Every structure is written in structure tokens, then in C-alpha cells.
């Protein structure tokens, strides 16, 4: 059994897609180890949005829970090392007693490479790309060592960390990788005392070289129902274009009324608007909901608006026989799943890389598909040709 700990929802879903590609049975949990028979258990957290100490404590608890069952661990990290990666690795090292880490965040197949200890995105160094202005974890350097240490400054200061591009029995190795073949080469040097961590692309090579799996070509892919409720929670331009394209097919598209975009929501407004959406969905059997086309800003607006959308979705699901819920945007999907207490899901289909369809465990007739905002929906979904 393999247990994967991820620091965000869409990254966790991407890992589920990789495992299913190789015919492995996957269980998916939110901040808890899924109690479902499987080959791969994937746990999604939201640890990028908390402090270093909270990320450490969360990963320490989850690692200890995972160790109650036989198998091995993989720590999923962001491909450009956003988040409190060092703090989370420290938690896994302390819980497992291991002394070394083979960390490979690169994904050369999409141009994300490490050369001479520096991270490249295509032809540009990381700090010269849009990642330099990331609102939470800006890339001010392209050195993978600096990125790792600077994003967890408290844990970096706790002890002397040996971080290098060469494998060592007592430290963190981040080897160069400019090709897919490079991802697997470093695995020849690891020992039983080595913790494995990194990107979904590296996880795929770990499955091939360590677990000996082979990609499946005869996977049965269940049909997606033509009735759906889609939530567009991303502000990515690509998502906005899709909304306009799907509107042109005749699918109803609705945004929050102005009253739900204010800091103080009028009493009963969510229930009132939800009732209108219930009637609309029952008539059309498909619908797209989004918060707004414009930027909305008031104190804690992101979490407040996310909670309001979660309540609307709950009202619709309680009164409509929705079988396909599609959510764009990892933060939105995480908020909805936490609010609805969907702690365990069963991934059933990888629609496209990073786009995964899952069965809600306590409601087998309901399927949830999640997609990062920057990714495309599969061609033909909702009548839209990519």
C-alpha cells in the first residue's frame, strides 16, 4: 500500500489520476487517511494556507496515522516548491525515523526542469517567470536550495540542513532533471532509509521503478451523465472563456446577485437565491454557477464567498438529483468538500491530466470532478469544443 500526502487538493487529484493510469485502486481523503480498501491512499490537505507550525503538525499527525498500516509513503510537493515544503518534510522524517530525502519537484515533460541546481520553466529561470509574483510564495530565486529553505524559514533555522544535488545518506537531495529519464535515475541510489517526495511526474517514475507497475490500456471509463452542475471558482482567464463558450451552447450560467457580493449578507438571501437555482436546474438539468466576473474584495472575502457558494451547492444537492458536480478551482473545491463533510472519495476516472472524477463514498450516485483553474476541461464537455 502506498500513502501519498499532498499539500493541496488539485495536486492530490493529479496523483490519483497517475495511479489510476496504472490500474491501481485509489482512495481519496480530505485531511484524514481514507478507510477504504485500496492500493494507493491519497490525502489532500490545504497546508499552503496555514503557518509553518500548523503544516508541520498536520503532516506529523497524518504520517503517524499512515504508519499504522503497512506500506510506504510519498510526499507530494508543488512542482515549483510553493508551500512549507521543508516543514512538512521534517514532520515525515521525525515520524518515520528516516534520515534522507530524495526530493524531485521537476516535470520535464512540460518544460519544468532543474539544471545545475537552478529551476527552469521553459527557456526562463523560475524567478524570471510569473511565479515571481505569486501572492503567497513568490519565487525570488531560482536556486532549488534557496526556495526550499526560504519558504520555511523557522524550520530552516532549527538545524543545519544538508541540501544538495547529490544523494547523501543524511540530508535532502534535489537532483538535476532535464528529461523524464532523469526522474527515474536517482532512484537507483536510494536506501530503505530514504523518504521520497516531489511532483506527480516523479511519482509516476517511482511507481514504474519501485512498484513495477505498467500503464494500463484497457481501463473501463464510466460514461459521464449529460446532466450536471458546474461551479467555476477560478478567476483564470481560461475559465472565464469556457463559461462564455458553454453559455453559447444554451446552458444556463448564473453569477451571485450583488446582495451576495457584499460583506454583510441580507438575512435569507442565500436560501432565496438557492431556491431560484433549484427551479432553474430542475428545468434545464444543467447549470453553471460562478461568484462574479469582477474582483470582489472585503475582509476575508475569499473564505466568506466560498462559504456562501458551499451553502448554495448544499441547497441544490438537497433538492435536485444532481449526479455530476464539476468544480473548477482547487480552493473552491476544497471549501465545498470541507463544508459538505465529504471526507472520503473513490477516484474512478482521469478525464485528462489533473482532471479527476470521483465517487462520493456515502452517496454512490453522486460524482465529483475537480480541475485546476489553469487546466482545460476535456474536449466536448458540456458541448464545448476545446
Image (cartoon, grey):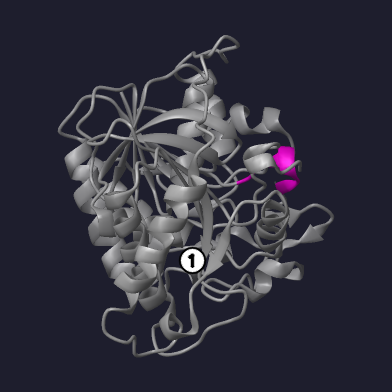
Residue visible at 34% across and 90% down in the picture: 264
* Res 188 → quadrant: top right
The residue segment tinted magenta is 106-113
The residue nearer to you, when weighing 211 against 148, is 211
Which of the image's four quarters has the N terminus? Answer: top left
Q: Residue furthest right?
A: 123
| Residue receiving disc 1 | 149
Residue visible at 36% across and 65% down in the picture: 274
* Residue 250, above or below 213: below
Q: Is residue 222 visible?
A: yes
Spot occupied by residue 127 in the image (x, y as percentages of width and height): 71, 69
Report whether 63 appears left or right of 140. left
Q: Residue furthest top?
A: 218
Spot occupied by residue 324 in the image (x, y as percentages of width and height): 44, 40
Residue visible at 30% across and 40% down in the picture: 98
Q: Secondary structure at mark 1?
A: helix
Q: Is residue 161 visible?
A: no
Spot occupied by residue 213 in the image (x, y as percentages of width and height): 50, 14
Residue visible at 50% across and 39% down in the picture: 227
Report whether 325 appears left or right of 249. left
Q: Is residue 157 magenta?
A: no
* Residue 49, above or below 384: below
Spot occupied by residue 350 in the image (x, y as percentages of width and height): 54, 31
The residue nearer to you, when weighing 308 against 270, is 270
Q: Residues within 10 Å of mark 1 (few under 14, many from 20)?
A: some
* Res 309 → quadrant: bottom left
* Res 226 → quadrant: top right
Amino acid at each position: 500500500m502506498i500513502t501519498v500526502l499532498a499539500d493541496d487538493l488539485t495536486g492530490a487529484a493529479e496523483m490519483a489520476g497517475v495511479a489510476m493510469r496504472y490500474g491501481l485502486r485509489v482512495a481519496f481523503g480530505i485531511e484524514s487517511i481514507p478507510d477504504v480498501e485500496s492500493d494507493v491512499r491519497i490525502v489532500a490537505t490545504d497546508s499552503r494556507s496555514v503557518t509553518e507550525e500548523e503544516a508541520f503538525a498536520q503532516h506529523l499527525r497524518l504520517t503517524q496515522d499512515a504508519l499504522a498500516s503497512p506500506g510506504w509513503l510519498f510526499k507530494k510537493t508543488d512542482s515549483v516548491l510553493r508551500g512549507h515544503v521543508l516543514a512538512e518534510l521534517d514532520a515525515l522524517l521525525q515520524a518515520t525515523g528516516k534520515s534522507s530525502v530524495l526530493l524531485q519537484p521537476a516535470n520535464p515533460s512540460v518544460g519544468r526542469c532543474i539544471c545545475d541546481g537552478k529551476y527552469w520553466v521553459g527557456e526562463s529561470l523560475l524567478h524570471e517567470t510569473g511565479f515571481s509574483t505569486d501572492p503567497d510564495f513568490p519565487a525570488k530565486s531560482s536556486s532549488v536550495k534557496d526556495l526550499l529553505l526560504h519558504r520555511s524559514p523557522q524550520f530552516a533555522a532549527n538545524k543545519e540542513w544538508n541540501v544538495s544535488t547529490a544523494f547523501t545518506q543524511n540530508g535532502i537531495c534535489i537532483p538535476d532533471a532535464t528529461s523524464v529519464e532523469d526522474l527515474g535515475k536517482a532512484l537507483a541510489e536510494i536506501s530503505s532509509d530514504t523518504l521520497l517526495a516531489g511532483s506527480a511526474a516523479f511519482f509516476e517514475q517511482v511507481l514504474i521503478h519501485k512498484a513495477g507497475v505498467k500503464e494500463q490500456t484497457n481501463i473501463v471509463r464510466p460514461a459521464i451523465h449529460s446532466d450536471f452542475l458546474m461551479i467555476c471558482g477560478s478567476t483564470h482567464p481560461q475559465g472565464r472563456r469556457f463559461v462564455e463558450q458553454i453559455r453559447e451552447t444554451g446552458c444556463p450560467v448564473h453569477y451571485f446577485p450583488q446582495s451576495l457580493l457584499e460583506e454583510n449578507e441580507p438575512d435569507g438571501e442565500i436560501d432565496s437565491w438557492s431556491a431560484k437555482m433549484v427551479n432553474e436546474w430542475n428545468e434545464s438539468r444543467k447549470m453553471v454557477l460562478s461568484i462574479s466576473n469582477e474582483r470582489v474584495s472585503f475582509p476575508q472575502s475569499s473564505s466568506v464567498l466560498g462559504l456562501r457558494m458551499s451553502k448554495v451547492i448544499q441547497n441544490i444537492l438537497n433538492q435536485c438529483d444532481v449526479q455530476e458536480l464539476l468544480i473548477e478551482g482547487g480552493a473552491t473545491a476544497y471549501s465545498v468538500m470541507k463544508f459538505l463533510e465529504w471526507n472520503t472519495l473513490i477516484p474512478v476516472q482521469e478525464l485528462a491530466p489533473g482532471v479527476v472524477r470521483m465517487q462520493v463514498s456515502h452517496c454512490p450516485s453522486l460524482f465529483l470532478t475537480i480541475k485546476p483553474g489553469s487546466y482545460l476541461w476535456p474536449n466536448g464537455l458540456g458541448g464545448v469544443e476545446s
